[in-house]
């Protein structure tokens, strides 16, 4: 262990190889020479239950951020568990990156990434150099040169490894941005360079060259209106000198020697009345690409209108959006997709205590599929008129009412009612594929800042309905929390219960009890103790799970060593704050306190934070109340940073939960491929025994066994169809109702476990069991009359 740490310290202390370091030369000498901050956490977990988990586990984590002379930033972190030891060092010896700046010019040296425009150079990493300059009178200039792709040589002993030619490129961007006029133009070009010597040059792909042009601008008309445009043109052709070396120049005329792509985006905004109107038009050619970007959303045309208005002296905020999108712009595909979208959002402030929100969105997708053999076998040219039209209509609606009970001082009480609806209609006629999902909640919150006490209670319900059946989940929940010992000790206890019901009767129930205590022992030290008990009963099994966690944490920062000659102690106090400016997670907050309040509010409305659990939002509101009314800079900054720390920490936990669910879903998809043959084999055996039972009689258990085998195979094949297009979970991404209901139902319990320090790997077993139960229940609702098609067996008549 000691040798590992000595190696790490030696690497940190003597290696000058840095990664993505940015510093300002004009501030050299004005910063303290050495600063560092970090944290250390150690915890253990005890588990008892039927899950496939170790009864005890522990985790030790630490991180350290060192800043030298305000220029070099060296991060370090380690993780030690009962399973593995990890040291993810950022000091990669084959990487070098510096970004020095002086006044209004910045340089990029080594491994860097720059962006000119969306359709030319946009974030592609290169090894070389670049600069950005912004003049005082609005003029802009940027330039870069470097290697975009590193060569991968051809290895005859490893033919599966595809060789890659080195790619070099350069680009410039210039423009003027001041007042009403913003104009920019960029040029980017890159080409492949084959190696000087190679075992077999013909194993390399044909070398290509790219030339991309872009124009971007914004100007004002009629005083307040704005018009924005973004144009791009990219040409990709084969590099001539490479074709000569590969002896392909003679046949170059038979190749598609030059490909030209175009892209544009136009946007018009105009303020009118007490809001504004806007229209956006976008079009990108199929296959659009440049060597200066990794990915493009190509082959689409989109136009939409937006209206935003403030009515009735600001009490009503109305937002409207409508548009249409299509693909297959060149007609080369057999399928053309068209999508009609519209949305309405209404916020109404009835009084100072009552607020309401209403939202609706509808999507209508039309897919025209053309049989390719109609074109091949066509004789009159009219066969292509016979196409398959498929329609899908999705609708979402939501209603929320929030009421604060009148209270000039003392405890705050509020009620909130929410209801959501989601419906899907597929095919022709649409009624054959109807599916409806309803969700509602009623909650009460009590917060007493003087007694440091908060309490909440809620009732949740969801209904999943299709043509043949309805599935209902309902249950109450409550939580109470309080601060003790001058807010050094925080305690929280919660209990929830829910049951599921189907047409056939009660399906199961779940009881959860959670407790958590956190104690701060002086500056930077904290101890957390949490416990969770769950009782789950279904028609298939009953299980009890109990988990207890203990964690110690220590954080340290703002330790500054001053090495200037007039310093005797080597330690100086922090500089007095003269302006209200601070940075957190690479976001700079500056300005007056009301302006910073608006900046923090804008950050808190990012999609990942809007999906946090209700109990987390309640805690964040409590932290927000501590800084929102402060006027002194020191206390305000302290509490604002506490809020941002909690906000981003919970956002990280939510992303960890999404990653956990994603792994569980992908594992289920992988396992389903292995079990398909076995489920069909059991079904065939059960079917034969059932046929024999119907002819000659026998064991009375045979019909029940056959029914279970049939239902499992039906559900398995139906679930395959539902998960066939699954490609991950992202904020704002629309998911099938099957997965959305599962994610929402498991959010609270898994979020609490993650926030208590439980490693995600320890939660995968329970999450997988819950997913299997959820999918099995859903499959029973959707496969009652589904026919079973055999893939591996043939039944004799």
Image (tube, grey):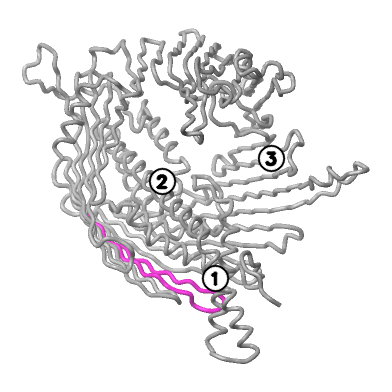
Using residue 130 as the reference point, say whether residue 707 is left or right of it.
Answer: right
Q: Is residue 109 above or below residue 507?
A: above
The residue positioned 26% from the left and 37% from the top of the image is 87
Residue 672 placement (x, y as % from top left): 51, 60
Q: Which residue is mark 3?
A: 323
Which quadrant is the N terminus positioned in? top left
Residue 467 placement (x, y as % from top left): 66, 69
C-alpha gap between disc 2 and disc 1:
32 Å
* Quarter occupied by residue 533: bottom left
Cβ–Cβ under 8 Å for marks 2 and 1: no
Secondary structure of the residue carrying numbered label 3? strand
Cβ–Cβ under 8 Å for marks 3 and 2: no
- Name the N-terminal-most of marks 2 and 1: 2
Residue 31 seen by the camera: yes
Secondary structure of the residue carrying numbered label 2? helix
Cβ–Cβ under 8 Å for marks 1 and 3: no
**Mark 1 crowdedness (10 Å alpha carbons): few <14, some 14-19, many ≥20:** many
Residue 213 seen by the camera: no
The residue positioned 38% from the left and 35% from the top of the image is 597
Secondary structure of the residue carrying numbered label 1? helix
Indicate whether residue 516 is drawn in magenta. yes
**Mark 2 crowdedness (10 Å alpha carbons): few <14, some 14-19, many ≥20:** some
Q: Residue furthest bottom?
A: 697
Residue 462 placement (x, y as % from top left): 52, 64
Q: Is residue 294 above or below residue 651?
A: above
Q: Which residues are magenta?
A: 494-517
Of the pair 663 and 577, the residue shown nearer to us: 663
C-alpha gap between disc 1 and disc 3:
42 Å
Residue 655: assigned label: 2
Residue 264: assigned label: none
Q: Which residue is mark 1?
A: 712
């Amino acid at each position: 262990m000691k040798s590992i740490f000595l190696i790490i310290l030696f690497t940190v202390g003597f290696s000058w190889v840095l990664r993505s370091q940015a510093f300002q030369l004009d501030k050299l000498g004005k910063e303290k020479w050495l600063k560092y901050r970090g944290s250390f956490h150690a915890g253990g977990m005890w588990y008892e239950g039927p899950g496939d988990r170790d009864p005890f586990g522990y985790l030790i984590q630490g991180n350290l951020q060192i800043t030298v002379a305000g220029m070099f930033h060296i991060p370090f972190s380690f993780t030690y568990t009962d399973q593995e030891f990890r040291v993810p060092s950022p000091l990669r010896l084959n990487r070098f990156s510096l970004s020095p700046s002086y006044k209004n010019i910045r340089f990029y040296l080594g491994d860097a990434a720059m962006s000119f425009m969306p359709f030319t150079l946009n974030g592609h990493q290169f090894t070389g150099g670049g600069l950005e300059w912004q003049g005082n009178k609005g003029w802009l200039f940027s330039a870069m040169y470097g290697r975009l792709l590193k060569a991968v040589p051809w290895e005859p002993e490893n033919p599966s490894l595809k060789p890659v030619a080195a790619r070099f490129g350069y680009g410039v961007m210039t423009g003027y941005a001041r007042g009403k006029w913003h104009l920019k133009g960029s040029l980017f070009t890159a080409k492949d360079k084959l190696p000087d010597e190679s075992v077999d040059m013909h194993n390399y792909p044909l070398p290509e060259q790219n030339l991309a042009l872009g124009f971007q601008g914004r100007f004002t008309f009629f005083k307040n209106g704005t018009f924005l445009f973004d144009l791009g043109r990219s040409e990709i052709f084969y590099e001539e000198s490479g074709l000569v070396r590969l002896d392909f120049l003679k046949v170059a005329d038979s190749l598609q020697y030059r490909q030209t792509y175009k892209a544009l985006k136009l946007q018009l905004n105009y303020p009118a009345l007490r809001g504004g109107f806007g229209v956006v038009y976008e079009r990108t050619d199929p296959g659009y690409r440049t060597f200066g970007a990794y990915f493009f959303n190509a082959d689409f045309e989109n136009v939409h209108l937006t209206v935003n208005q403030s009515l009735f002296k600001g009490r009503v905020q109305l937002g409207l959006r409508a548009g249409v999108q299509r693909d297959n712009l060149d007609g080369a595909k057999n399928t053309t997709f068209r999508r009609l979208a519209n949305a309405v959002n209404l916020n109404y402030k009835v009084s100072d205590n009552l607020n309401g929100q209403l939202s609706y969105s509808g999507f209508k997708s039309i897919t025209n599929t053309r049989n390719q053999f109609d074109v091949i076998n066509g004789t009159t040219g009219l066969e292509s008129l016979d196409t398959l039209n498929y329609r899908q209509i999705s609708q979402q609606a939501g209603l929320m009412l929030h009421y604060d009970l009148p209270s000039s001082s003392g405890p705050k009480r509020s009620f909130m009612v929410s209801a959501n609806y989601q419906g899907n209609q597929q095919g022709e006629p649409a009624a054959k594929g109807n599916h409806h999902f309803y969700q509602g909640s009623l909650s009460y919150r009590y917060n007493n800042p003087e007694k440091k006490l908060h309490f909440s209670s809620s009732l949740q319900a969801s209904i999943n309905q299709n043509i043949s059946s309805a599935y209902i989940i309902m249950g109450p929940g409550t939580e109470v929390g309080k601060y003790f010992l001058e807010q050094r000790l925080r305690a929280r206890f919660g209990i929830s219960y829910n049951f599921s019901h189907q047409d056939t009767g009660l399906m199961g129930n779940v009881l959860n009890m959670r407790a958590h205590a956190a104690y701060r022992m002086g500056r930077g030290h904290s101890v957390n103790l949490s416990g969770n008990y769950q009782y789950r009963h279904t028609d298939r099994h009953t299980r009890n799970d109990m988990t207890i966690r203990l964690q110690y944490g220590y954080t340290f920062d703002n330790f500054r060593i001053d090495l200037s000659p007039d310093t005797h102690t080597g330690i100086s106090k922090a500089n007095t704050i003269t302006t209200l400016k601070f940075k957190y997670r690479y976001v700079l907050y500056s300005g007056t306190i009301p302006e910073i309040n608006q900046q923090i509010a804008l950050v808190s409305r990012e999609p990942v934070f809007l999906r946090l659990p209700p109990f987390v939002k309640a805690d964040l509101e409590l932290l927000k109340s501590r800084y929102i009314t402060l006027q002194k800079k020191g206390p305000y900054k302290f509490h604002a940073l506490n809020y941002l720390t909690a906000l981003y920490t919970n956002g990280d936990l939510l992303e960890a939960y999404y990653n956990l669910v994603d792994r569980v879903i992908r594992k289920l998809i992988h396992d389903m491929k292995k079990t398909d043959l076995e489920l069909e084999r059991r079904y065939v055996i059960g079917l034969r025994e059932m046929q024999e039972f119907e002819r000659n009689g026998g064991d009375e258990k045979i019909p029940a066994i056959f029914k279970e085998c049939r239902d499992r195979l039906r559900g398995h094949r139906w679930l395959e169809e539902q998960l066939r297009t699954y490609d991950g979970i992202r904020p704002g991404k629309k998911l099938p109702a099957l997965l959305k209901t599962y994610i929402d139902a498991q959010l609270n319990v898994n979020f609490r476990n993650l926030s208590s320090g439980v490693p995600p790997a320890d939660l995968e077993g329970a999450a997988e069991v819950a997913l299997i139960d959820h999918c099995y229940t859903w499959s029973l609702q959707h496969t009652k009359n589904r026919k079973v098609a055999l893939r591996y067996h043939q039944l004799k008549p």
